Image (cartoon, helix red, strand yellow):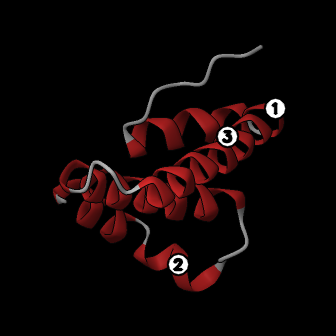
């Protein structure tokens, strides 16, 4: 939960400015993913939350691939700030 609060502090200013940007959507999906992951550590048989997590992971992956195609520099910065792995290109 420490990373969650750290991410929310970093993007506090951007949150009010541009909620529809790709970067903001990736950050919000990352927060949801971390929250759901911690929830699933306690509730291993919550299959609906597992399905929701997989859907959010897919959405974030599509947004990350879009960002890597359009703006490679911002993609690398965002990956570093959020501390997530770089996606594999197919």
Disc 1 vs disc 3: Cβ atoms closer than 8 Å? Answer: no
Picture quarter containing residue 38? bottom left
How far apart, in angstroms, are the residues tagged by discs 1 and 2?
Answer: 23 Å
Q: Which residue is mark 3?
A: 64
How far apart, in angstroms, are the residues tagged by discs 2 and 3?
Answer: 18 Å
> Is residue 32 placed above or below 3 in the rendered structure?
below
> Is residue 82 placed above or below 26 in the rendered structure?
above
Q: Which mark is residue 87?
A: none
Query: Closer to us: mark 2 or mark 3?
Result: 3
Question: Residue 80: percent from the left, percent from the top?
Answer: 42, 36
Residue drawn 46% across and 27% down?
A: 85
Q: Which residue is mark 2?
A: 15
Residue drawn 44% across and 68% down?
A: 11
Residue situated in front as seen by the camera: 88 or 22 = 88
Question: Residue 34: percent from the left, percent from the top?
Answer: 35, 54
- Mark 1 is surrounded, within 10 Å at the Cα level, by few (under 14), some (14 to 19) or many (20 or more) other residues, namely few
Question: Residue 58: percent from the left, percent from the top?
Answer: 66, 43
Picture quarter containing residue 1? bottom left
Residue drawn 74% across and 42% down?
A: 62
Sequence order check, earlier mark of 2 and 3: 2
Q: Secondary structure at mark 1?
A: helix
Sequence order check, earlier mark of 1 and 2: 2
Q: Secondary structure at mark 3?
A: helix
Residue 45 left/right relative to 68? left
Q: Which residue is mark 1?
A: 69
Disc 1 vs disc 2: Cβ atoms closer than 8 Å? Answer: no
Residue situated in front as seen by the camera: 8 or 13 = 8
């Amino acid at each position: 939960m420490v990373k969650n609060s750290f991410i929310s502090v970093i993007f506090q200013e951007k949150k009010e400015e541009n909620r529809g940007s790709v970067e903001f959507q990736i950050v919000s999906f990352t927060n949801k993913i971390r929250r759901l992951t911690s929830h699933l550590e306690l509730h291993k048989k919550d299959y609906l939350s597992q399905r929701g997590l997989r859907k959010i992971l897919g959405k974030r992956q599509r947004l990350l691939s879009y960002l890597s195609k359009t703006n490679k520099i911002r993609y690398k910065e965002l990956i570093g700030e959020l501390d997530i792995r770089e996606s594999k290109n197919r």
